[in-house]
Amino acid sequence: MTTITIYTLPGCVDCQAAGQAMDRKDIPFGLINVASLPAAANFLRGLGYQGVPVTVVRDDDGTVQDHWHGLRPDKLHALVRQRTQLT
């Protein structure tokens, strides 16, 4: 099963919107506050990002399958399709 994590900062309106969009699509996800976890900020920089929200999708063994910045409806639709195919 894939795991989805949204990397956020406190008070980030775009981060809240990304989480709400996942909720509306009934996509389970976790949140990581980059401000309280410096290693997370370094991880995002390693992926090439300088801001949040960043969504990271990992496969069963923890390998990063996909990642993106901001609210991406196309990526959300792909996640919904993927979940539908698995059920």
Image (cartoon, grey):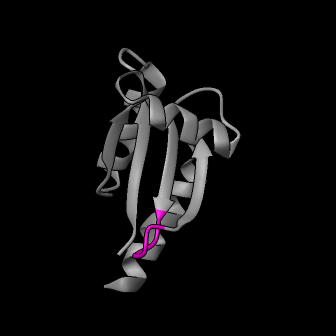
The vertical placement of 64 against 12, above or below, is below
Question: Is residue 60 part of the magenta span, yes or no?
Answer: yes
Which quadrant of the rendered structure holds the N terminus?
Answer: bottom left
Residue 4 image point, x, y percent:
40, 56
Toward the viewer: 5 or 84?
A: 5
Q: Report the residue at 52% width, 31% height from top.
A: 41
Magenta part of the protein: which range? 58-62
Q: Is residue 61 left or right of residue 52?
A: left
Q: Report the residue at 47% width, 73% height from top.
A: 81
Residue 62 image point, x, y percent:
44, 67
The vertical placement of 28 against 59, above or below, is above
Q: Is residue 60 visible?
A: yes
Query: Where, by quadrant of the figure, is residue 85 drawn?
Result: bottom left
How many numbered marks have been drawn onto this rendered protein structure? 0
Residue 45 image point, x, y percent:
64, 36
Residue 5 image point, x, y percent:
40, 49
Characterize the magenta stretch by its predominant secondary structure.
loop
Q: Is residue 70 visible?
A: no
The vertical placement of 29 against 35, above or below, is below
Question: Is residue 61 part of the magenta span, yes or no?
Answer: yes
